[in-house]
Image (tube, rainbow, N blue to C red):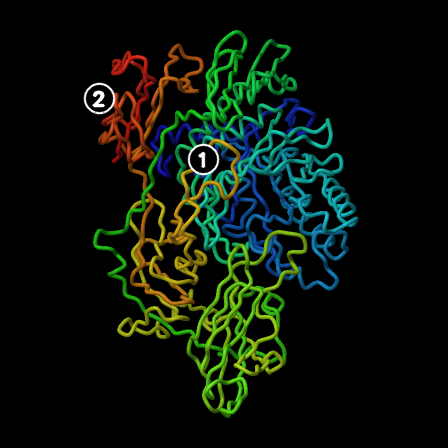
Amino acid sequence: MAAAMAPTSLLVLVLLILCHGVELSAAANVTYDHRALVIDGRRRVLVSGSIHYPRSTPEMWPDLIEKSKSGGLDVIDTYVFWDIHEPVQGEYDFEGRKDLVRFVKAVAAGGLYVHLRIGPYVCAEWNYGGFPLWLHFIPGIEFRTDNEPYKKEMQRFTTKIVDMMKYEKLYASQGGPIILSQIENEYGNIDDAYGKAAKTYIDWAASMATSLNTGVPWVMCQQADAPDPIIDTCNGFYCDQYTPNSYHKPKFWTENWSGWFLGFGDSVPYRPAEDLAFAVARFYQRGGTLQNYYMYHGGTNFGRTSGGPFITTSYDYDAPIDEYGLVRQPKWGHLRDLHIAIKLCEEAMVATDPESIDLGPNLIGDVYRAESGKCAAFLANIDNKTNATVIFNGKTYFLPAWSVSILPDCEHVVFNTAQINSQTTLPEMKYVNSDDQSSELAWKYVQEPVGISKSSAFVKAEILEQINTTADASDYLWYSTSLDITGNEPFLSDGSECTLHVESLGHVLHSFVNGQPTGSAIGSGGDSKVSLNLTITLVKGINKIDLLSVTVGLQNYGAFYEKQGAGIISPVLLIGKTASANLSLSEWTYQIGLQGEDSGLYDSGDSSVWHSQADLPKYVPLVWYTTEFEAPAGNDPVAIDFTGMGKGTAWVNGESIGRYWPSYLAPESGCEPCDYRGNYDAKKCRKNCGQPSQTLYHVPRSFIRPGQNKLVLFEEMGGDPTIISFTTRQIARLCGHVSENHPPPVRAWNSTNKSPVLHLECPRPDQVISSVPFASFGTPYGTCGSYSHGGCSSSRALAIVKQACVGATSCDVEVSIDLFGDPCAHVGKSLAVEVACS
């Protein structure tokens, strides 16, 4: 899909939106029964996808929604993020990316429903689980339990959101798109830790939510004891075996994890399209009627919104729509075809429970039969190694290992989860200007002072925990003390050396002695605690020790997670061979945040504070950098490659694009070849081992102005800004690989052509297929971008594909020996093609 559309396509889309607007303008009665959600008396099979409005921009929303609808979604699911809407108690913000009403209305305009997951705890790898930090300081509060101060605030915010939606008439009962709401979130994972108070809290939350009279059902995910009428739902990589806690409730899957989140210091996770499709098909096969992809578009953790801690700025999640808003192929297309196949079965599926049939070891059939005579079947091979052939209704069907075939008429296979008909795309980052624009940028800098530099600093004769001290107003907290050295101290060796020992609850710690950096220590997503042991040299007289403690997003998950601290803990020691000194009870001066943050360097128009490039410091900690850059030409998504930098934060025209940390490398091991067959988990499929976790940082086009733009960096650890580059994300190459035993395209279900077809389509309507670098019919092998001819190959393949495709925006090529001839009799054949679009 593309941001720009041909006039005819645009007219069709406008007409569709207008039609759906009329459809959604009438109030709808939304209920549920054992089989499904019931909308105006009609049971529905629904496909949903998560898109979090603050992880993209309002300018991106319509295109994301249109691509979601084109991908076969019925519903957009989003959390509501309390911390961004009420950053100060009683003061609300619903502007820009935070405009929840605008987002819900955009979904309605796109012709889709909404599942509004209010929570208000969200998890979501979001800072502090979505709770505002001021909540932590309410006297007597304890989160997510039967605690009156907490329940009061939770009810107040939940009511605020519900009242906003009601005022705008956005519930389906008012003619709006919202058909479901969620209260709480994955509480069943941790409720044992809260004892008896957990049950009374959940019962209260359910009663509070239903009393708000939204006119639509409420759900609680991962809550086996959700009280009536709340629908309990499943989250996970697979939910086919899930059963609701009451026969009267339908089987819903609120989070089907389409990939996994990325942490700084981790290799990049991905989930194969075949396995994701298998999980979805198995869920609908076993009686499910609403499934939600978490995420369908993951987006970006702008500013300081990522939690974890150590969650990257990218929240791509290997979702069907990538971080930049481009469809990820073949995942998006394979799932689109799956959704079409499932919808062909809807009439039979909602009429009854499935009837299971044993087809052999690890071979399972499920059949839906409606009174109308409509029949639909799902045939599954859950063996993770062995392909199989089964007999069903007197006919023979081939089932690849770890796959599901869908038969909308109980006879013909329209889709198999392991056989991808969709094209594959190869996105690439094109660096701006062949001469590398970064070398032309004129950089300026300001040195951030080491230690205390702000008048707001304060003194305490103790070590303070960081979160309670900063209230998360900044990632940074300075701890500063001094001591007078005579040279005869017993903890000194040779009169000057000792070991500085500091421990921290997390997440990063930098040490400076007498203004000079002496070392750093960092935690990880697996263990955020930090331990620093450095040999330092002290001089006679006054010595200054400055410790900079840094958070990388606050904890977002777990029982009592709000009680997990950060920053330095006692004791802070100077250790010698025979003695040690405890500095913990010395006077410590504290500074919250950086001088440059307070003076607004990230958005400052005051050019006088910046020093020229002539003496630009490189690979030095605590430096602010700025430059101006030209807006990259065109409409392709933009990113900055921060290779060469250490760790810090970046702003474009005053908008924070998040934390960067390209110097944090993933482990060398763990990126073995991934077989989609067999149970997936978050560690199974990984790439980019030994590489930076993230080098590319998305800059939404709406952040960029025509002409000159301002980039500001705060470099915490040391780097060279002259190395960074601007890139645009483009898709120029497409591939397809379809075999003779693939089902015909699902879109051809009612046509007479029952042959497999390889379909290729340029991503933008202004592009055409300009060349065919590879085409082979026979036994080709390899992956997109590196196909090779096998021992059997038709001599006519390249000419036939060129004739069908070159000069066209899209093309269809039948995969058959009638077209290509038979280069090797009695051998299974396939067609592999790579094309370029321009």
Q: Which quadrant of the rendered structure holds the N terminus? A: top left
- Please rate how many residues cluster around mark 1, counting C-alpha atoms within 10 Å: few if below 14, some from 14 to 19, many from 20: some
- Residue at 29% across, 60% down: 723
Give how far across and how far down residue 222 sits, in percent: 66, 40
Near-viewer residue (248 or 159): 248
What's the mark number on residue 803? 2
For the C terminus, which image quadrant? top left
Please identify the residue farthest to the front as the structure is shown.
578
- Amino acid on which disc 1 is placed: Pro
Q: Residue 356: percent from the left, percent from the top?
A: 62, 18
Whether residue 760 is situated above or below residue 552 in the rendered picture: above
| Left or right, residue 134 beside residue 408 | right
> The residue under label 2 is which amino acid type?
Gln
Considering depth in this image, is 178 or 584 the residue closer to the camera? 584
Image quarter for residue 289? top right
Residue positioned 73% across, 47% down in the render: 192
Q: Residue at x 75, y 62 (%)?
A: 140
